[in-house]
Image (cartoon, grey):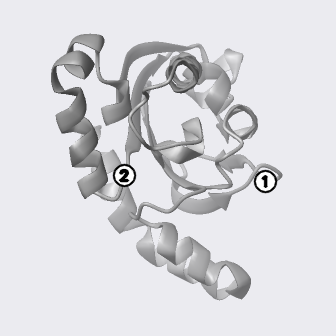
């Protein structure tokens, strides 16, 4: 399954390039968002194979938190905790239909801003220095693995709740592999669905 997710960005480049020919006004935005750290833009890959659904979300931290620096103030730490809490409820973020019976098997959240407290205290200044050297660009990477009892009922993903939860996210470049093949689509809050 993991090889499907890894292959998605490459497999779908021709599909996305072809789609861009019909949407000239989005051509630069869509092409530039692939694999880059662009504020307001996130990437989502999903693969449905048999009963297993895997979803990966990659986003600049500023889209989810409103900042990218180390969380030092109480307000910043509260925003980090709130974002984590939202990301730990992926069923609602991805609009998975209840009929599909998808149960979360695994969830991993990775970001320098999610470092544990022990790490923060021990390496706080060193960590901040590393972030400044990198232009204070921090990313959030979330990976989810589901087992779906009725995968045929899972027709697609609906990311409206994700856009509502994280208003700093303006666009999501979604790429999926499912029973009907593969496709890529640029999603926005008013056009937030993609089908498998």
Residue 127 to residue 169: above or below: above
Which disc number belongs to residue 127?
A: none
Front residue of 61 and 2? 61
Which is closer to the viewer, label 2 or label 1?
Answer: 2
Secondary structure at badge 2 equals loop
Front residue of 168 and 102? 168
Q: Which residue is identified by label 2?
A: 136
- Residue 192 position, x and y percent, is 73, 48
Residue at image point 49% right, 75% down: 32
Front residue of 82 and 119? 119
Front residue of 181 and 120? 120
In the rendered image, is residue 15 in sight? Answer: no
Q: Residue furthest right?
A: 190
Residue at image point 68% right, 54% down: 170
Residue 9 to residue 149: above or below: below
The answer to which of marks 2 and 1 sits earlier in the sequence is 2
In the rendered image, is residue 181 in sight? Answer: yes
Give the alpha-carbon distance from disc 2 to disc 1, as whole Å: 31 Å
Residue 84 to residue 54: above or below: above
Q: Quadrant of residue 39?
A: bottom right
Residue at image point 66% right, 46% down: 168
Q: How many marks do you count on the picture?
A: 2
Q: Quadrant of residue 141?
A: top left
Which disc number belongs to residue 191?
A: 1
Secondary structure at badge 1 equals loop
- Residue 100 position, x and y percent, is 62, 20
């Amino acid at each position: 399954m993991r090889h499907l997710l890894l292959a998605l960005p490459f497999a779908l480049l021709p599909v996305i390039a072809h789609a861009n020919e019909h949407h000239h006004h989005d051509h630069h935005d869509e092409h530039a968002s692939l694999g880059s750290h662009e504020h307001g833009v996130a990437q989502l890959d999903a693969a449905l194979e048999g009963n297993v659904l895997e979803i990966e979300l990659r986003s600049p931290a500023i889209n989810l938190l409103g900042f990218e620096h180390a969380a030092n103030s109480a307000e910043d730490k509260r925003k980090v905790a709130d974002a984590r809490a939202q990301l730990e409820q992926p069923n609602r973020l991805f609009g998975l239909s209840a009929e599909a019976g998808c149960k979360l098997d695994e969830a991993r959240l990775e970001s320098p801003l999610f470092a544990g407290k022990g790490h923060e205290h021990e390496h706080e200044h060193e960590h901040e220095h590393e972030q400044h050297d990198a232009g204070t660009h921090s990313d959030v990477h979330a990976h989810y693995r589901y087992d779906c009892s009725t995968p045929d009922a899972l027709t697609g993903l609906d990311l409206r709740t994700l856009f509502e939860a994280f208003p700093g996210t303006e666009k999501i470049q979604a790429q999926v592999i499912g029973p009907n093949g593969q496709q890529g689509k640029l999603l926005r809050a008013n056009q937030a669905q993609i089908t498998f």
